[in-house]
């Protein structure tokens, strides 16, 4: 990636940055969200109808690793953080050019604060008596990662961002690899014997999902910032005007492949663990994210094969809305009201499950279709 990748070159001109959307990014974001708003259940429903063995395999891939390991569902969250970084490279580059650093930082802070508060609301808000209120969570991690990565983006070019990425990742790795937690004589990556869990147990207020830590806890937010920086760097390269589109796609394939291989090799010493966002997990999930982007970029933006993209675009341009609706409305609960009870029992377990999960997904798609038709988008 050459000198032209720097943020300075993106904001030095007085000519406004064109407000073009790269369609493959919206489609990929919609694909990512698809699995959360009904796609996982729908796929499991199909697998149930086809073969029990296929259902078992799909069910494993659509579940998180209990501790060590990496399955398809372990990619969903870091892909969101990665795409949040890509969005920062698009929106902040334009705002920096048009309004300057102060206005950009204020806007970034406001957006991240609102997303953080929405995350608390998603977790149940303040409906429970303290300390049963969960402070951190998925949206909160995206907000914090975006905030700190965005601040770095305001003051650094791509070299500084790349250096920051390695400082964050290697610093996190060194702490876990060479410094025992208080009360231990040796280091460990096991549950409740590592720094992420210890810091949460000592300093994270409110309700923790697990007995002594939160999977979106305090210390593990640091490498998540690295994931967001990866998204920013990828977005900066994707925006380059002097690189042919096919070359960009091939570079993404090469970089993604190297990251995945490096991550799995690193995993021999530093286990791949989503719940504490280990450095090897950052590398593997980041590599897969870039490979997915490359695939979508070739199909959607280079080869222009777009007949299948419409529902993913509906979701991808309104991800926060459908994510909150999933929690507040409850697509699965609503689907059970429509095709549950006697209907489910009459159809039988396999067909009933498929019909119910299909209905849940249909409700989600109906909502995003309507919002897109009326041009209603939740923007922070």
Image: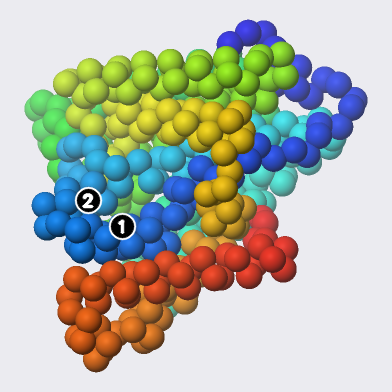
Earlier along the polypeptide chain: callout 1 or callout 2?
1
- Tell me the colour scheme of the image: rainbow
In the rendering, which numbered label is found on residue 43?
Answer: 1
Q: Is residue 205 above or below residue 67?
A: below
In the rendered view, does 64 fall on the left or right side of 285? left
Quadrant for the N terminus in the image: top right
Q: CA distance from mark 1 to mark 2?
A: 8 Å
Residue at position x 72%, y 31% in the image: 93
Horizontal and vertical percent for residue 92?
70, 36
Horizontal and vertical percent for residue 64?
24, 49
Asked which quadrant contains residue 238, the reply is top right
In the rendered view, does 286 fall on the left or right side of 9? left
Q: Is residue 91 above or below residue 11?
A: below
Horizontal and vertical percent for residue 268?
16, 21
Report the residue marked by disc 2.
58
Can residue 129 be seen here? The reply is no
Residue at position x 29%, y 26% in the image: 280
Asked which quadrant contains residue 41, the reply is bottom left
Mark 1 vs 2: CB contact within 8 A: yes
- As helix, strand or loop, the secondary structure at mark 1 comes to helix
Spot the residue most to the top: 2
- As helix, strand or loop, the secondary structure at mark 2 comes to helix
Quadrant for the C terminus in the image: bottom right
Can residue 23 be seen here? The reply is yes
In the rendering, which numbered label is found on residue 300?
Answer: none
């Amino acid at each position: 990636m050459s000198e032209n990748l720097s943020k300075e070159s993106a904001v030095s001109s007085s000519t406004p940055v064109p407000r073009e959307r790269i369609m493959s990014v919206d489609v990929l974001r919609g694909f990512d969200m698809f699995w959360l708003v009904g796609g996982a259940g729908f796929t499991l429903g199909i697998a149930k109808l086809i073969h029990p063995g296929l259902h078992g395999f799909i069910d494993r891939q659509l579940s998180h690793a209990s501790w060590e390991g990496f399955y398809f569902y372990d990619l969903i969250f870091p892909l969101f953080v990665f795409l949040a970084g890509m969005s920062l490279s698009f929106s902040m580059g334009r705002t920096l050019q048009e309004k300057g650093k102060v206005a950009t930082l204020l806007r970034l802070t406001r957006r991240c604060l609102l997303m953080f508060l929405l995350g608390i609301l998603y977790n149940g808000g303040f409906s429970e008596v303290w300390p049963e209120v969960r402070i951190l969570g998925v949206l909160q991690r995206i907000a914090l990662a975006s905030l700190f990565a965005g601040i770095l983006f305001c003051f650094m070019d791509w070299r500084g961002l790349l250096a920051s990425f390695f400082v964050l990742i290697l610093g996190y790795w060194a702490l876990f690899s060479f410094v025992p937690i208080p009360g231990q004589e040796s280091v460990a990556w096991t549950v409740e014997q590592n720094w992420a869990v210890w810091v949460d147990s000592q300093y994270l207020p409110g309700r923790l999902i697990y007995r002594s830590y939160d999977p979106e806890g305090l210390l593990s937010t640091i490498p998540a910032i690295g994931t967001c920086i990866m998204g920013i760097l990828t977005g900066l390269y994707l925006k380059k005007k002097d690189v042919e589109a096919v070359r960009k796609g091939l570079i993404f394939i090469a970089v993604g492949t190297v990251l995945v291989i490096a991550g799995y090799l690193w995993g021999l010493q530093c286990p791949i663990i989503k719940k504490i966002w280990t450095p090897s997990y950052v590398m593997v999930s980041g590599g897969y994210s870039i490979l997915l982007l490359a695939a979508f970029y070739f199909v959607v933006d280079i080869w222009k094969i777009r007949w299948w993209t419409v529902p993913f675009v509906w979701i991808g341009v309104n991800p926060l809305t459908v994510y909150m609706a999933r929690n507040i409305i409850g697509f699965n609960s609503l689907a059970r009201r429509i095709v549950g009870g006697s209907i489910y029992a009459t159809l039988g377990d396999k067909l009933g499950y498929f019909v119910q999960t299909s209905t849940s997904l249909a409700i989600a798609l109906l909502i995003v279709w309507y919002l897109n038709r009326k041009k209603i988008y939740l923007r922070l």
